[in-house]
Image (tube, helix red, strand yellow):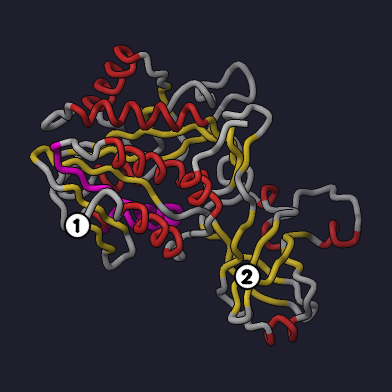
Amino acid sequence: MAKINDMLLKLVNESGPSGFEQTIRSLLTKELRKYVKDIKTDKFGNLIAHKKGKKPTILLVAHMDEIGLLIKGVSEEGHISLATVGGIEPLALIGERVKIETKKGFLQGIITTKEMHNGEEITILPPMKELYVDTGLTKSQLIKSGVTIGDYLHLVNDATNLGNEKIITGKALDDRLGCFVLLEVMKRLRKNPYDFYYIFTVQEEMGLYGAKTSVYNLNPDWAIVVDTTNAEDFDARGTKEIGKGPCITIKDAEMMGNKCLNDIFKDIAKKKKIPLQIEITDFGTTDALSISVAKGGIPTGMVSIPVRNIHTMAGIAHLDDIENAIKIIQSILANPPKTCVS
């Protein structure tokens, strides 16, 4: 089996839902210190690393947070009701494992429903309000363990290869894959003379909030945001397939990708024979929106890695798409445009 990069595994397996990014931030900070000296965390929690150099000044952005769950309530029987952090389909949660951090350690739990509990046939897809976590403890026992309303229910699913050794599955591929891409670009461009800010944002899944605050004190010439996108390769009609290259966004539900940057990406892909896919969608948006409309407008390109089962504990992505995203970003940064107004 192909060995999955150790740092990629650590990033994907670590828990870091919106509002609880500190574990990911610590992991990234330790790695960043190997390559840059100027590292800070802003007041909102974004992690910003600056490799000083000559103009142009370029932002490279990926979000640290993942979708998650909070404890909303506890019944007398010990059934823990859920509140979502970010967009999650109830179907994707049934049967999944969670852990609750307490002062006495971690409690393990399983997400279930009344019908599953009783071994009954499920005839109607249950809504989120009917899902609950079973820890095997009663309400009083949970309270004694230190469990409180508002605690995070950390989702658990260690990443691994599938049958194709180049395919990875795991939770939080959105957007730990992007974080890994930024780390690899930083590593490979240590001697690059240009001015780079590597920004790892918080709370993307809740409303792109970290990206809004991250650029407040910066004055970039342009930016690249690295994220994931939903694969559409269930049948032959799909336009975004895993293993066929990263995607550049022409348009999503709320923004237009920068044409100048997209044209450069296309030229690089053609000259260097890097597979590249085009994304045009009416669904969703990313930190690229917040970056692009900040500071009077920042030309922003979007590079995404296609993921099957996105926003589940069993995302599926191709290692070649990750590597090709690194290559195309590395190539544009080797000789970056001074500006890129569409």
Query: Can you give x and y, in whole percent of width and height, for residue 330 in the image?
Result: 28, 30
Q: In percent of the image, x 73 and y 53: which residue is there? A: 94
Q: Nearer the viewer, mark 1 or mark 2?
A: 2
Image quarter where the C terminus lies is top left
Quadrant of the rendered image containing residue 214: bottom left
The disc at residue 190 is none
Quadrant of the rendered image containing residue 148: bottom right
Q: CA distance from mark 1 to mark 2?
A: 35 Å
Q: Is residue 29 left or right of residue 340?
A: right
Q: In percent of the image, x 68 and y 53: which residue is there? A: 93
Query: Can you give x and y, in whole percent of width and height, for residue 200 in the image?
Result: 34, 52
Q: Is residue 157 left or right of residue 22?
A: right
* Label 1 Cα crowd, 10 Å radius (few <14 / some 14-19 / many 20+): few
Residue beneath disc 2:
100
Q: Looking at the picture, which amino acid does disc 2 mark?
A: Ile
The region drawn magenta spans 193-213
Q: In percent of the image, x 46 and y 65: which residue is there? A: 20
Q: Looking at the picture, which amino acid does disc 1 mark?
A: Tyr
Q: Are marks 1 and 2 in contact (CB under 8 Å)?
A: no
- State whether residue 235 is above or below residue 336: above
Nearest to the observer: residue 1 or residue 227 = 1
Residue beneath disc 1:
216
Query: Can you give x and y, in whole percent of width and height, for residue 308 in the image?
Result: 58, 34
Where disc 1 sits, the SS reads loop
Q: In percent of the image, x 16 and y 53: which residue is there? A: 218
